[in-house]
Amino acid sequence: MVNVDPTTPLLRMSNIVKHFPGAKALDGVDLEVLPGEVHCLLGQNGAGKSTLIKVLSGAHQPDSGIITLSGEEVKISNPVAALKIGIATMYQELDVVDGLSVAENVFMGHELATAGVSRRREASKRTREILNQLGHPEIRPSREVGTLSAAGKQIVSMARALSHNAKVIVMDEPSAVLDSEEVDNLFKVVEALQSRGVAIIYISHRMDEIRRIGDRITVLKDGRSVGQNLDAQETPTLELIKLMTGRSVEHAIPPRVSVDRSADAALLEVSDLALPGVFSGVSFHVKPGEILGIAGLVGSGRSEILETLYGARRASHGTVTVDGKPVKRGSVPSAVAAGIGLCPEERKSQGLILGEPIYRNVTMSTFARFAKSGLLNESAERKAAQEQATALDLRPVNVNRNAGTLSGGNQQKLILARWLVHGCRVLLLDEPTRGVDVGARSEIYQLITRLAEEGAAIVVVSSEIPEVLGLSDRVIVVADGSVVTESPASALTEEDVLNLVMEGSAA
Amino acid sequence: MSETTTSPASNGAPPNAVPAHTQTTSRRGNGSFVRNIGLVVALILLIAVGVVTSGERFASVDNLMTILRLASAMGVLAIGMTFVITTGGIDLSVGAVMGLSTVWATTLATQTMAQNSTWLVIAATAIIVGLVCGVINGVIIAYGKVVAFIATLAMMVASRGLAEIISNRQTQLIKVKEFTAFMRDSFLGIPNLVWIMIVVAVIGWFIMNRTTFGRRTIAVGGNPEAARLAGINVRRHLVYVYALCGTTAGIAAVMMLGRTNSGSSTTGYLYELDAIAAVVVGGTLLVGGRGTIVGTLLGVLLFTTLTNVFVQNNMSTSAQAVAKGVIIVAAVLLQQQFAAREKAHT
């Protein structure tokens, strides 16, 4: 890893700019990758990493900027073009087809065939060669991919990249789905690729991985490359974090007044909660009027903690109580009856019926209350929904319109309205501002703060650290399925939290 | 919906798009109205064809009652099916369950209880058999997590077999006078069979549109995960819906007993497919989330009238089948057009 070829860069991206309506995703990014190196890309959520990868893989077209590969300027107009010139991307979600064999997956999209008849023997042979190169001769080309582990699938995905004779392979958080032994294997493969002169662009939040296999680091912040070609071994973590943070929070979060709640009884109490293979020993409490933030990486178990305490997943261990009364394990109806409401991460797929009117979405947890012996009183429903919609400034105000017509921020308000109609006193918010545009964000923040002031106990999960710190009174940090820190939000800085989630332990 | 409907260029800039369309009417209501109008027009066209080709033989009160009487059992069956399809499921077993219900009821009435049996025994047995089959379907689908298509296919095969065992493949005649008399009778000039369908349809419409049961059905079909996370007990509700569908199969079995005066293991053969076709033609979405009882009834009437027109013109049942196939495809194509247009609006 030290023997980086000091020759000319294999890939160079200079001054890449990409606008999306209302947002500048990339604002002049430079990236330089040498042959045979592992180049790490660091940056917080929203810093522009995914957009940069998408430009490289042909999924997005840059507004301006130059990309050169082996000294020649290239235009990457679509994903096929990217593969043709030798740039392959392994996305976070594994892109293999479970029902097909290893060889069929490797040659998917560029099948070896004569007049439409596939040359299976040849495909099999070449797949075996590639797998040998990768150091995984034990995976048979004829094996069905669905029977492989996540790590095995990743090897197949990598074999596909190599079958295109890729010179540059982009790996987007490849270790997120792997356990530590599988990560070791992945790194062996990466080293094998390096020795053949393949350059790897490696995206990860985990410092230990970057230290182990990285050669150089480029840091992105707010769509700009703020640190370039830093030494992956020598650069101190704190310096990297300093580069990544300090993002201007352009949306105001109302200041939290710290109140002494030591005399109050907890409204929500979670003790020793566990979900096998995901998290264990999670305990915390939230008092009325308090906002608790949960920070952690994707895959750390932060969303699962919310879903488990809500009963959407069945805990193997532990108790949840509201006002001292225990909530039945693994039962959403009893959690809802106890006054817990969840605003899920994926609003469209988990929260709403898009083809139904707004008012019916609002009363989805409460419509039985508007009924006498099963008979619905829809005008009462409409009235209750309208009241909340007005109070939350939901737009459009007409509650007869379909929920699918709402913008992201208004969909979030709709789900909040649902729990307010219900009278929930414990609100679980998973990524409350994901997909919400800048203007609506501050409204959502004010709303959350107001609900807390009115006596709700609120738990916020977010991958945006400034959001967690700004909104919460107290913060817990989770890493690898356990709570590593609990602290008042005012005692933590963005750097501290980032350090905790990346290193998995106190600095 | 932004990623599917707005162009990429306007994506992410919703604030100024909000006040642009703040009309007051519910588009949803309009949509189902337009769909039903389409069906009514098709039905009128078909009636016109019948009048032109067969004149008074077709356009008589007697013939109208014949059509309605033939439509009645299918109508009841299709109403139960509407609920199942609204949840995004399917029930292939209803025809076979009808057969099983008829032979169980007739066996009990003609053999076990001999002379003392009353119409109540017949009707209650048939309905309970249907209900139990529906509950079994629902439990296997909701708690066993078996795909509805497979679970109800298994029930279809098994009930047909059980019906053959019970009846020893014999047709069993009903000798309970009050029962057969009631089923042949009319009230206010309308056959009692048709009255049964009307009552079931009114109750079905009411349940679907005015009760918490109907709301749950639509929610479960519209987005099962969202319904679950909103606190609806999705699995329990699915059991109820399949139980309801089985019950309508039992009621339809009672009606068939009345119409044919006998129970047989072949009763209701392929009725499940006609029922599904009527529901889909009526405008209920196969993917779930929207169900229309009125549409289903119109679908049933459309198919029954079609049969009648063909019979009046001495045309073969094979030609009838071809026409049916064409109507089903045409209706589904239309449905997709509406769905696409509705999506474009949102």
Image (cartoon, grey):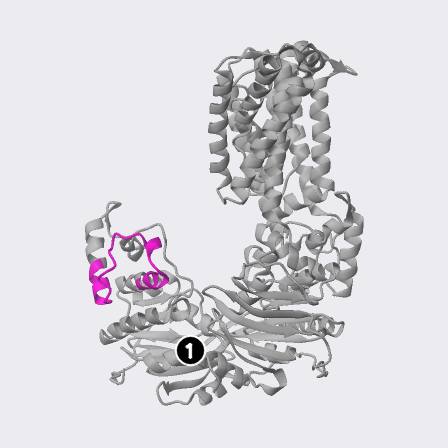
Membership of A146 in magenta stretch: yes
- Kind of residue at disc 1: Arg
Where A236 sits versus A28, above or below? below
- Please report the residue visible at 53 percent of the width from the left and 23 percent of the height from the top: B323
Q: Position of residue B157 (x, y in %)?
A: 46, 28
Q: Position of residue B103 (x, y in %)?
A: 56, 19
Residue A436 figure quarter: bottom right
Camera sees residue B90? no
In the visual, does B220 lie left or right of A216? right
In the visual, does A304 lie left or right of A394? left
In the visual, does A314 lie left or right of A322? left
| Magenta range | A128-155
Question: A141 or B305: nearer the eye?
Answer: A141
Q: For numbered disc 1, what is the local secondary structure?
A: loop
- Please report the residue visible at 22 percent of the width from the left and 54 percent of the height from the top: A124
What residue is pinned by disc 1? A206
- Please report the residue visible at 21 percent of the width from the left and 66 percent of the height from the top: A133
Question: B285 or B151: nearer the eye?
Answer: B151
Residue A249 figure quarter: bottom right
Mark 1 crowd level (few <14, some 14–19, many ≥20, 10 Å Cα)? some
Where A243 sits versus A267, above or below? below
Question: A120 or A26: nearer the eye?
Answer: A120
Q: Where is residue B294 in the image (x, y as percent from the top left)?
A: 68, 33
Q: Where is residue A405 in the image (x, y as percent from the top left)?
A: 65, 56
Residue A270 figure quarter: bottom right
Quadrant position of the N terminus of chain A in the picture: bottom left
Q: Which chain is indicated by disc 1?
A: A
Membership of A161 in magenta stretch: no
Where A449 sits versus B330, above or below? below
Where A417 sits versus A372, above or below? below
Camera sees residue A497? yes
